[in-house]
Image (cartoon, grey):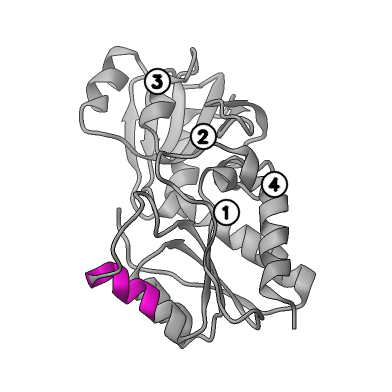
Amino acid sequence: MPSLSELVDYCDQRTRRAEFKDAPGAFNGLQVANRGTVTKIGAAVDAGVEPFRRAVAEGVDFLIVHHGMYWDMPRPLTGAAYERVATLIEADCALYSNHLPLDAHPQLGNNALLAAQLGLSPARGFLPNYGGPIGVIAAGGVPRAELRRRLESHYRRVIALEFGPEIPAEVAVCSGSGNSALAGLGGVTTLVTGELREEQFNRAQEEKLNVYLCGHYATEVHGVKALAAELAEKFGLPWTFIATENPL
């Protein structure tokens, strides 16, 4: 059986975890250890008591999440925070979190995979970070009606704000929250993202943009699945995706 440290080292290096500056208080990497060996890998979008319980029920002892437990440290281990940690420790399940590095990755990242899902080829990045751009901009040429159709074939709820050109020259892709992406489009008129704040509707209308909102959770399942699958193949382990009913 591979060791926990082998899997953590591989994930760290493959995603270039240490090179990225993440949100204030975020902690990427191993958040909870286990006794040192791994038999089954899990992938989930969010840390939480319910995803942890489902992972434990499926025999997972190394769980990869996109949104980890720690965003504001230190925090007392009481209430829900205690339940989260206790669920993992009692089942000897390690927790590994990878946020912005897994958004940005050119092969395993949420944005590259979302673009590929739509049949779009990333041409350049946007939203700069120390480790590299987080979002991707793909060559357009696809009518917005067809782009919307493709999105609706993959995502159960698509909100379309269509104030831009009917045939966009380029399409920006930013999974999860698109608020910073909307401010960094640099002339691109079409954005595919997860969610926006309410007041961004006016901005899209005034700046004549096409914006497609497909859900924060739904647009960020791709990276953890890809990393878990690659890790499982390399180390000869089974893996599973821990889905939740998150509609947001």
According to the image, label 2 marks what residue? 173
Label 4 secondary element:
loop
Label 3 secondary element:
helix
The main secondary structure of the magenta stretch is helix
Q: Say if 164 sits above or below 237 in the image.
A: above
3D distance between C-alphas at marks 3 and 4: 25 Å
Would you say residue 161 sits in the magenta stretch? Answer: no
Assign the N terminus to one quadrant of the image. Answer: bottom right
**Residue 144 x %, y %:** 46, 30
Residue at 44% over, 78% down: 88
Q: Given this view, does label 2 or label 4 mark the residue nearer the observer?
A: 4
According to the image, label 3 marks what residue? 183
According to the image, label 1 marks what residue? 223
Residue type of the residue flagged with mark 1: Gly
Mark toward the start of the polypeptide (2 vs 4): 4
Residue at 62% over, 47% down: 17
Judge the density around disc 1: few (<14), some (14-19), many (≥20) Cα neighbours within 10 Å: many
Residue at 45% over, 20% down: 184
Judge the density around disc 4: few (<14), some (14-19), many (≥20) Cα neighbours within 10 Å: some
Mark toward the start of the polypeptide (1 vs 4): 4
- Foreground residue, 173 or 68? 68
Total marks placed: 4
3D distance between C-alphas at marks 1 and 3: 24 Å
Q: Is residue 201 left or right of residue 51?
A: left
Mark toward the start of the polypeptide (3 vs 4): 4
Task: Residue 166: name its quadrant.
Answer: top left
Mark toward the start of the polypeptide (1 vs 3): 3
According to the image, label 4 marks what residue? 107
3D distance between C-alphas at marks 2 and 1: 14 Å
Mark toward the start of the polypeptide (2 vs 3): 2
Q: Say if 129 sits above or below 238 in the image.
A: above
Q: Magenta span covers which residues?
A: 79-86
